[in-house]
Image: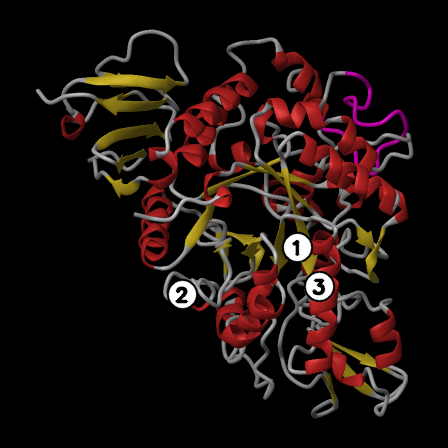
Amino acid sequence: MTSRTWWKEAVVYQIYPRSFRDSDGDGVGDLKGITQKLDYIQQLGLDAVWLNPVYKSPNDDNGYDISDYYDIQAEFGTMRDFDELLSGLHKRGIKLIMDLVVNHSSDEHPWFVESKKSKSNPYRDFYFWKPGKNGGAPNNWPSFFGGSAWELDITTGEYYLHLFSKKQPDLNWENPALRLEVQKLMKFWLDKGVDGLRLDVISAISKRTVFIDTDTSDFNETIRKYYANGPRLKEFIAEMRSTVWDNYDCMTVGEGPGITPENSKDYLDSEKGLNMIFHFGHMFLDQGEGGRFDPVSWSMKDFKEVFKKWDDAFSKNGWGSVFLGNHDFSRMVSRWGDDKNYWEKSSKLLCTLVLSMRGTPFIFQGDEIGMTNIELKSIKESADIETQNGWREAQKKGVPEQQFLRTVNYAGRDNARTPVQWDDSAQAGFTAGLPWMKVNPNKTSISVKSQQSDIESVLSYFKHMIALRKAHPLLVYGSYLPIETEHEKLFVYSREWDKEKWIIVLNFSPENINFPTVLLMGKSVVMISNYDGIIGKVIRPWEAVVYRVVGKN
């Protein structure tokens, strides 16, 4: 039987601080704003908060470009504000997972400022510097954010590597001095009492230092073959664990594209690895060769297969996470559900899926009330560097703005970053000032205030589903077995643990579907459903039902 730990049983709530709650009216969410909402977080039944970066940063990529790992970004508050937030969480029995970015820093970090001064500077090897080739960049690697992954610096006439923005130079983990600095900064936050670390782009920290050209135009394939899963990855993770993590009662979760079911064991060694990982098997299903702004159709068959493959991998090696959205993707219900005709039902269905799967559930702020994508009217309204860079690349290809906007409004990161809709007031209760990013107009129909006292709301259902998971260890530790039906749009699976069996039935369609004969399970009890009334012989549009099997025919 798998060992029981707090981080396996936890339900984690992700907070994107810039968009959560603004306490001082400057239009930017802050640490005090989060502290003001701790009772709300506690009432949801959550066990931990994952906090997106709040370190000092020029904000080229909204905090994922860190210029000082030991200080708080002024617009978010002060270190005292952080300490008060941490204390407030702990008083309520809620743990804090810090987002730590150590694949790259900001180009305004003192290390990089020194690094570019000369080829002999002691900090030169904290980053990757290479001479050009054939009058251009050292190789043909593309950046995640468009254009080349190399930037020429005129001071020394060499290029530095940046897999993301040119203001996010990649750190050179081959350098032992750099790794010692990373260990120090990790210890700083863990000594403060932080309970876990979410390690951004951990899949890319080990580089293939020969830097050969990519041989494919498929960007996700380039990630897998050239950026992720480098030769010293296991060594670097093991070193961090032995020198830092094992000295604390902390949880580590690694994130990064390029992690596959086959190589997940490289990340999750029980003695030398991370505790769990985020994978993107389902999150890249609708991306073509060009990445985010090259959408392709996806099928429920493929969607279901992702869950099976990854559960099989995690059953052999380590533990996984379960999520359907975060700050880097579209809103959960707009992407996987129906945010128009069946907004409420599909929001509840997706909550059911996330909270009934094996693995640690991560819920992105606002998904507990069914927040949806926003419709940008112009690229100028986008506050995301990836979208702005993508538009520049699209213009070179002659793509009209309205065509590109349709893609952005489907897949862009702005969708997840609109302010949380606390009420239906002018700025949705997020700020008394002008918000850094416009509020979704549907705040008048979707808000915390409108749902808190409504027992039929998405928010109430979310709370009930969390309570169900907490009351039944089967939903955490039970085996996962997909059940095949003749209906592709039906996602059906069983969870079994300690002689107990549950069956989850999810209809990912707006159609009525006859109840499959394979599900005639004998006597059963409905534990939760997103419809009122009798469960009949027809599975209704976007219906979600969780059964506990109590006997045989």
Q: Does residue 398 lie above or below 479 as drawn?
A: below
Magenta run includes residue 262: no
Numbered mark located on residue 399 in the image: 1
Residue drawn at (73%, 80%) of the image: 177
Crowding at label 3, few (<14), some or many (≥20) Cα neighbours within 10 Å?
few
Quarter of the figure with residue 111 = bottom right
Marks 1, 2: nearer the viewer? 2
Numbered mark located on residue 474 in the image: none
Marks 2, 3: nearer the viewer? 2
Q: Considering only order in the chain, which callout, 3 or 2, is on the residue closer to the N terminus? A: 2
Q: Does residue 130 lie above or below 433 as drawn?
A: below
| CA separation in Å, label 1 and label 2 | 42 Å
Q: Which residue is mark 3?
A: 396
Crowding at label 1, few (<14), some or many (≥20) Cα neighbours within 10 Å?
few
Left or right of 389? Residue 501 is left
Residue 127's x, y, as percent? 74, 79
